[in-house]
Image: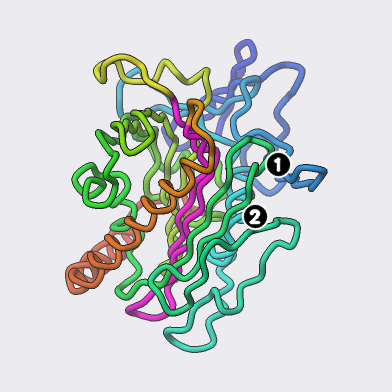
């Protein structure tokens, strides 16, 4: 891996894969001791204070990592992946199990939620608890990170093969999204990254599984119940793990990324912002898996949280119900697709396989 410097820009070349690291001279980039190339040393620091929160930003305007997309001339900023996945693991114990590959199921079909370890510094309030239902638990923390909106967490158990990409499609593909989200108007992947290996390098060569999809997506909703139409610009990705687990994640782009907003969707509307989003799937057997969905979203506008939170919870429940029905009906097709994906993964010339 080579690096050349002109002004405050570093350009790394990795087997003809280029990405830029832009930084402030006041904050020089130091090489990570365990890596064979110079890149940003990313460190998660979580310090509970009077209001529980994270101390480091996911995106930093003075030090950015840019990667080309499949749209010529368009680059997207990549986040501090250690910070991002550190946050996800803090609020989603199932994501921590997936990432650390520490399954705790005693017998086939048993749920990880039966023996999961909670972070005692997070004061979750349980809204619903139904151990034998599809959605076993609904939790929230009000004013999480002092951002004036709650973080929600829903847990469930679904029968069928654990297929993360299929579950992600329920959110990312418009036709599937319409089946459970009554407010959706459009959703699409606007700027997929050109080379996933760039992201996998920055993620630490498999530290967070294998990134199989990454890009900036656009979402626009129509008026539904008390909430008028909203729009979002979100960086989303899919992480796959050797045991079949999957973490689907997303975070809102910052204001300095607004040039990526589409110009063919009419006038700008109120912006909703997903501060943190993750859906984690972990197998409990060949035909069953646990699901944990975590979301902190500022809906925007002046509506109080007591109005928007029940709407969000019911909408997410719709995703679980749709997912359960789909996985129950399409088990054979999903198994065949998983075998095909496993074969492609073995053949893929990934940076993860390179000494």
Q: Which mark is residue 328?
A: none
Residue 246, percent from left and from top? 43, 60
Q: Is there a contact, CB below 8 Å, between mark 2 and mark 1?
A: yes
* Magenta-colored span: 271-299
Determine which residue is flagged by label 1: 54
Left or right, 38 with respect to 344, comes to right
| Residue 353 visible in the current orientation | no
Q: Is residue 316 left or right of residue 204?
A: left
Residue at position x 22%, y 46% in the image: 178
Residue occupying the point 31% across, 72% down: 161
Q: Is residue 129 magenta?
A: no
Q: Which structural element holds mark 2?
A: helix
Say which residue label 2 marks.
90
Q: Tag 1: Cα neighbours inside 10 Å, few (<14), some, or many (≥20)?
A: some
Determine the secondary structure under disc 1: loop
Coloured how? rainbow
Mark closest to the chain's N terminus, 2 or 1: 1
**x, y percentage for residue 66?**
50, 26
Q: Residue at x 27, y 60 (%)?
A: 322
Q: CA distance from mark 2 to mark 1?
A: 10 Å
Quadrant in the picture for residue 29: top right
**Residue 49, above or below 100:** above
């Amino acid at each position: 891996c080579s690096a050349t410097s002109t002004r405050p820009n570093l350009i790394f070349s990795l087997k003809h894969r280029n990405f830029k690291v832009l930084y402030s001279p006041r904050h020089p980039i130091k090489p990570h001791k365990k890596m064979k190339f110079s890149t940003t040393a990313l460190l998660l620091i979580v310090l509970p204070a009077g209001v529980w929160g994270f101390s480091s930003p996911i995106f930093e305007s003075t030090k950015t990592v840019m990667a080309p997309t499949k749209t010529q001339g368009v680059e997207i900023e990549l986040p501090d992946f250690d910070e991002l996945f550190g946050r996800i693991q803090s609020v989603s114990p199932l994501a921590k199990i997936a990432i650390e590959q520490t399954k705790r199921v005693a017998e086939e079909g048993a749920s990880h939620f039966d023996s999961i370890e909670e972070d005692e510094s997070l004061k979750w309030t349980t809204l619903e608890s139904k151990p034998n239902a599809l959605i076993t638990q609904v939790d929230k923390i009000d004013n999480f990170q002092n951002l004036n909106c709650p973080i929600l967490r829903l847990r469930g158990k679904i029968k069928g093969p654990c297929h993360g990409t299929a579950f992600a499609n329920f959110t990312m593909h418009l036709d599937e999204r319409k089946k459970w989200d009554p407010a959706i108007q459009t959703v699409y992947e606007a700027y997929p990254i050109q080379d996933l290996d760039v992201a996998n390098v920055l993620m630490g060569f498999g530290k967070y599984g294998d990134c199989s999809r990454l890009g900036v997506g656009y979402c626009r909703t129509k008026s539904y119940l008390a909430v008028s139409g909203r729009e979002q610009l979100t960086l989303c990705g899919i992480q796959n793990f050797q045991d079949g687990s999957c973490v689907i994640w997303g975070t809102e782009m910052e204001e300095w990324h607004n040039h990526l907003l589409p110009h063919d969707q009419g006038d700008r509307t109120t912006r909703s912002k997903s501060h943190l989003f993750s859906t984690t799937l972990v197998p409990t057997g060949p035909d069953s898996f646990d699901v944990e969905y975590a979301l902190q979203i500022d809906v925007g506008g002046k509506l109080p949280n007591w109005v928007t939170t029940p709407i969000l919870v019911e909408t997410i429940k719709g995703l679980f119900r749709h997912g359960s029905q789909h996985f129950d009906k399409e088990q054979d097709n999903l198994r065949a697709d998983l075998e095909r994906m496993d074969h492609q993964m073995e053949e893929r010339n990934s940076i993860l396989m390179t000494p």
